Amino acid sequence: MVSTLWLVGGGIVLYTLVAMALKAQGRLPEAIRVQGPITTIHTQRGKAFLNWLAGPKRFWRAWGNLGVGIALVVMVGSFALVAFAAISAVRNPTPTALNEPQNVLAIPGVNDFLPLSVAPEILTGLLIGLVVHEGGHGLLCRVEDIDIESMGLALLAFIPIGAFVEPSEASRNRASRGGQTRMFAAGVTNNFAVSVVAFLLLFGPVAGSISVVAGVPIGGSLQGSPARDAGIDRGTVITSVDGESVADADAMQATLAESRADSVPVELESGETVTVQREVLVTVAVRDAPIAVNETVTAVNGSRVSTVGGFEDAVGSRPVADLTVRNQSGTRSVQLPIGTYSLVAPDGALAGQTDLSGGETVIITAIGGNRTVDFDDLSAVLDARQPGDTVSVTGYVGGYDGERRTVEVDLGGSGSDAQLGVRVQRGVSGFVLDDFGVDVYPSNTFLTVLGGNGGGGLGGIERAYLTLVLPFASLTLPDVGYNFAGFVGPVTNFYTVSGPLGLLGAGFAFFLANLLFWTAWINLIIGQFNCVPAYPLDGGHILRTTTETVVSRLPVSNGRALTSAVTTTVSIAMILGLLVMVFGPRLLT
């Protein structure tokens, strides 16, 4: 199937060919100008309105001065952020989805984090951002008596990518440095102001009218899992398991852990009841594990098991077990030690008191006479000990085919935190088991960030930052696992609307929340990006005018050359930093 990126790219090429042909034949109106795939639409309309709006000049100059201060702070932060990201990309070049070329473009359906389902809200927020940005430049032009040659919209083929105000170059040069700086800062000031207004509306009355439905919201089910076989998938809300009401994921896991039944009835928020036939599915496995992801453990030492609890019961007294494993090719028998899969830390207690040097694999089956089947068992044993306690550690050094050894170790650590000196893999013997197979959607977390649930004690700046990273939360926030694109699709099943907005319908409330979310998000991005101190961005122009102001007060003979050297050096550093930040991780690995 042809990807959206290829379709958009093909459309841009076709548009460019047609537009260039019309330009060559002189069939385009004078107001429309084409340069390759870039089209600009010019107009003289709106000048009279800007002249009228610029009337209270003292107020707008105060607004512009405020914007200059904000822009300078953001410019310094942008410089530091880009420099830090570029250095990190060189030192630790780890590619992520954020480095994919299509994810640099804010195009819904092309950018993996901007889905087509919210394209109207995203494009509306983008249009608002472009209008207020360039409108701010135009307004401050008139406040500072700078003439405007034309205004308009810039498009990449058929995709709006910016608006513009063309000030008269001669008129702009006659304006004071302060007037020019205020004019260049006005666009980002307006973008940040729009973000603040949108955030206040979203964090206040809109998110306050939305609440999470009772039950367990399912973000998805694992491939080949019992839950997926029973028809439980994204958008499902589970309200009870095995006859027990479950208010959240912890309650559901506790109910499943207590049950040893081969099948459990599951009631859904829709009122439907389905039966889940449980099987022990491998969901995570270390690289050298003899059991792979999506394989099913059907028996332990010949006795059938269908639940994780039953599996743990069967291996509880057996440091080594024969597992019957089923996959698409059939069944097979695997014998392996059952314990906590660990890597010996070079500077830990275990390596320091034995002949181990660090880095060895050890499957720990007992500590101090206490059986350790999995990560939780090992943690519980250490929690009951103190640093300095002497314990016997039994395990298989070298992994699955390793030598069984028992050693005496004085636990390390500080305070009441006893440490053995190993890095532990979650699960049993290097693999994680699941007899249900669902991922819980963090609906409560997302709503709290957006101002619902009473706000969760988050401050305004902290909430703004978390909101900014929500579209790629799976990469930036720990233990989230999902990106938030808005209240769209099956996700709306996890929320309900009440209060005055509820009278207008849940659909309207979700649309309004999405519009405010994406408007705030995009205007923050536009403002921050334009503050990057590099030409031809606003930050580059502000850098020039502020540098000229500082240099003019210095005892130097050639201030213009010094200004050019400073602005050129900073601009080149920023451009190179951005390129390394985006492309470096993939080029260096």
Image: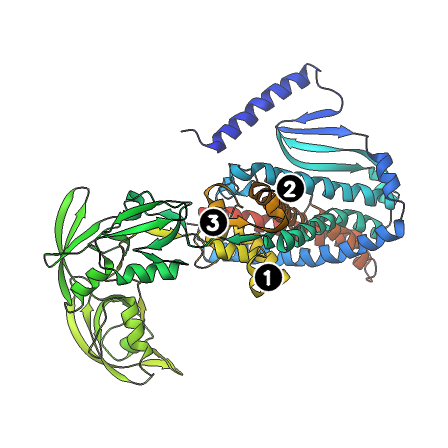
As shown in the figure, which amino acid type bears the numbered disc 3? Answer: Phe
Residue drawn at the location 48% of the way across and 43% of the way down: 100
Q: Which residue is mark 3?
A: 494
Establish if 314 lies above or below 576.
Answer: below
Residue 509, position as x, y percentages in the image:
59, 45
Q: Which residue is mark 2?
A: 125
Question: Which of the 4 image quadrants contains residue 322?
Answer: bottom left
Image position of 476 (left or right of 307): right
Real-space Cα separation, disc 2 to disc 1, in angstroms: 22 Å
Establish if 396 lies above or below 218.
Answer: below
Instruction: Say which label, 3 or 2, has the lower sequence index.
Output: 2
Residue 13, position as x, y percentages in the image:
55, 25
Which numbered disc covers residue 462? Answer: 1
Instruction: Say which label, 1 or 3, has the lower sequence index.
Output: 1
Image position of 168 (left or right of 432): right
Q: Secondary structure at mark 3?
A: helix
As shown in the figure, which amino acid type bears the numbered disc 2? Answer: Gly
Residue 189, position as x, y percentages in the image:
73, 51
Establish if 108 lies above or below 476.
Answer: above
Instruction: Say which label, 2 or 1, has the lower sequence index.
Output: 2
Question: Which of the 4 image quadrants contains residue 451?
Answer: bottom right
Question: Are the two marked residues, 3 and 2, in contact with CB atoms closer than 8 angstroms?
Answer: no
Residue drawn at the location 89% of the way across and 49% of the way down: 57
Q: Secondary structure at mark 2?
A: helix
Q: Secondary structure at mark 1?
A: helix
- Can residue 232 be spotted in the picture? yes
Residue drawn at the location 31% of the way across and 85% of the way down: 388
Question: Which of the 4 image quadrants contains residue 73?
Answer: bottom right
- Can residue 547 be spotted in the picture? no
